[in-house]
Image (cartoon, rainbow, N blue to C red):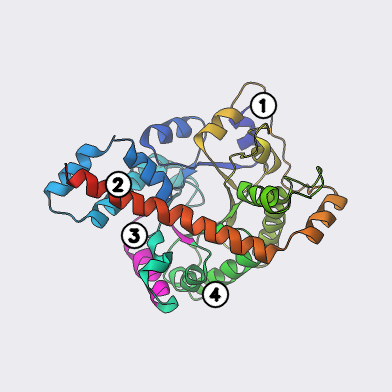
Amino acid sequence: MPHGLAALVASGTKLWLDSVDPDLIQEAHSAGATGATSNPAIISDLIKSGRFDDRIAALVAEGAPDDAIAWKLADDLVRQAQKVFLDVWEKSGGDDGWVSFELDPLIEDPASGLTLDEQVGRYVELGKKWSAGERNRLIKVPATPAGIGAVETLSALGVPLNVTLIFTQSQYAQARDAVWRGASRLKSLAGFKSVYSVFVSRIDVYTATHLPHLSSRAQGQLGIANAKRIWAANRTFWAGHPTPLAQQMVFASTGVKQAGSDPCLYVAALAGSDIQTNPPATNRAADAAGRDFPAEIDRLPAADVLAELDSAVDMNRLEEVLMAEGVEKFTGPQRDLLALIASRRRK
C-alpha cells in the first residue's frame, strides 16, 4: 500500500511543484510530480540566491535592459521545467505535464497609470507573446477585473490558461464563464486547456485576523470548505460542457501558516482529485514515512460549521482584502527583482 506522496497521487491528486527551481524540479519529478507553477515571488527569490549572477552579467553585457533581463530569466527557468515535464504532457495527450508562466504583475500596479482597457490589452499582448511556440506552458492570469477581461480573448486564441488569485466562488465563476465564452469560438476544443487556482491557506489567515470570534471548530476551516465548494462547482459545470481535456482546479497556497498545525492539513483535506501545487517543504512533510492520504475532496466540514462560516464571513469583503494583498505579494517581488538586476548592473 503506498504512503507519502505516492499515496497522495494514488488518491487521484495530480501533484505539481510550486517552484521552478531547477534542482527542486528534478527532485519533484522523481517523487511523482507531473507539473509546476511559477510566480514573480518564486522567480525573484531564485534570482536573489545569486545562482544566476553569471547569466545576468552576460545579458547585461549584451545590452539588455533590466526588464528584458528579468523576463528572459523567467522564461529560461520555466522552459527548463517544461522540458522535464514534457514527457508527462506527451503521454497524457496534453492533459498534464504543464508549467505555468505568470504575466507581468506590474500591469496591476496602480503606479502604472494604465486604464482597465489598457490592462486588458497588455494581458492579451503578453499572453500571445509568452505562449507562442510553447507546447506545455500555461499562461497565468490573475482573476482581477483586467485579468478576467483578458481571458476570453486569450482562450479564443487557443492560449492554455491558469487563472490565478481566486479566493471566492464569484471570482471563479466569472473567470470560468469568460474562458468558456472564448473557447466556444474555437474551431475545435481538442487542445483547449484551462485550470483555476483557488488559494487556500490565505483565507484562514484572513479569518484568524479579521474574525477571531469564530468558534474553535470553525476557525481554520473556511479555506478548506471554500476550496471544496469551488471544486464541486467546477465539476458540475464541466460535466455539462464536456471537453477532450480536463478543465480542473488547482489548489494553491497549501502551505500551512498556523503555528502548531499539521503541515499537511490542506494536502490531506484536498486529496482525491484535480491538482495540488505544494511548496517544496509541504511536499517533504507529506512524503514522511507512514503518511496516508485517502480521498477527502468531496467531504465538507460539518453542517453546523458551514452554517457558522456562512453567517459570519462576508465573502465580498474577504475577496477585496485578499486580492489587494495578493496583487501586492506579486508586484512587490517584481519591483524587487528589477531593483536587484539594476544593482547587479552597477557592479
Helix, strand or loop under label 1: loop
The image quadrant where one finds the N terminus is: top right
| 263 versus 315 height, above or below | above
Does residue 27 appear to the left or right of 53 in the view shown? right
Q: Distance from label 4 to label 2 (Cα)? A: 32 Å
Q: Are marks 1 and 3 in contact (CB under 8 Å)?
A: no
Q: Are marks 4 and 1 in contact (CB under 8 Å)?
A: no
Q: CA distance from mark 2 to mark 1?
A: 35 Å
Q: Which residues are magenta?
A: 118-141
**Mark closer to the chain start, 4 or 2:** 2
Mark 1: amino acid: Arg
Q: Which residue is mark 3?
A: 130
Magenta-span inclusion, residue 58: no
- The answer to whether residue 136 of the structure is visible from this angle is no
The circle on residue 76 is 2
Q: Look at the numbered disc 2 and give the secondary structure of its residue.
A: helix
Name the residue tied to disc 4. 181
Q: Closer to the N terminus: mark 3 or mark 4?
A: 3
